Image (cartoon, rainbow, N blue to C red):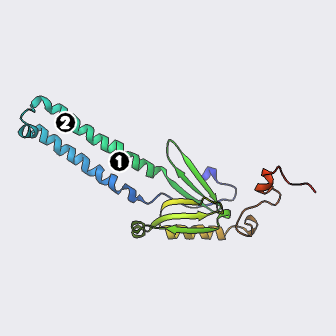
Amino acid sequence: MRKELLPGEQVIVVTRPQPRTLIVPALLFIVVPALAAYACAWIVKGGPAKLVPLITKEWTPWLIGACVALAAWVLLGYCLPRAMTWHATRYTLTSQRLVARYGMLRRRDQQISLAAVRNVDIHQSLLQRVMRSGNISLDTGYPAGTVVPDVPEAATFRNFILDAVDDLPQEARGAEGIVHNPDAAWPWETREGGRDER
């Protein structure tokens, strides 16, 4: 992020989503190998043959392989992708913008200029309130608002955003907090082919 900062821009805080999404993958990461090891030991001791007499000793390698494959499928197919998704998501608040990055291989960046922010709201479920996280909604004046999901310490993060907006220079904000360069055309003037030269 340091290489991508604008001139005079400073990083205020960098965070990831609330790690509560990793609770189930972490539990499975502990329980699944233990269950797989127990099942393999039970198979080696002849447990399946006691339940189903048709299963002979020749089945033992196949049953152990099935247990190991099932455990690997849960760990690699469920736990690892969720951990990687959490690790690859990052929220960076600077003195001029909020940058949300999602994904490792397929990356999606979302940047919101703080000068365009008119209102900051927090939406919390009951679990999020207990964990002190929340979804931060930024009103920038466009019909579709921007939502930053599951931010940890949501109230503190919102206060950081509001402080950064207040610290912006007045010339960078219009009357309603919208950035506008007086020498540049307004969006509707650009769409209609530019300003009238008078």
Percent of width and height locating residue 120? 58, 68
What label sits on residue 79 in the rendered view? 1
> Circles 2 and 1: CB distance less than 8 Å?
no
Q: Give me the residue at 55% from left, 68% from top.
A: 121
Q: Give me the residue at 49% from left, 59% from top.
A: 149
Specify the amino acid type for callout 1. Cys
Q: Quadrant of the C terminus?
A: bottom right
Quadrant of the image occupied by residue 51 = top left
The reply to whether residue 118 is in sight is: yes
The residue that mark 2 highlights is 64
Percent of width and height locating residue 179? 73, 62
Percent of width and height locating residue 164? 63, 67
Tell me: 14 left or right of 78: right
Relative to the observer, which residue lies in front, 164 or 53?
Answer: 53
Q: CA distance from mark 2 to mark 1?
A: 21 Å
Residue 42 vertical placement versus 7 (above, below): above
Relative to the observer, which residue lies in front, 154 or 52?
Answer: 52
Q: Give me the residue at 66% from left, 71% from top.
A: 166
Tell me: 105 left or right of 11: left
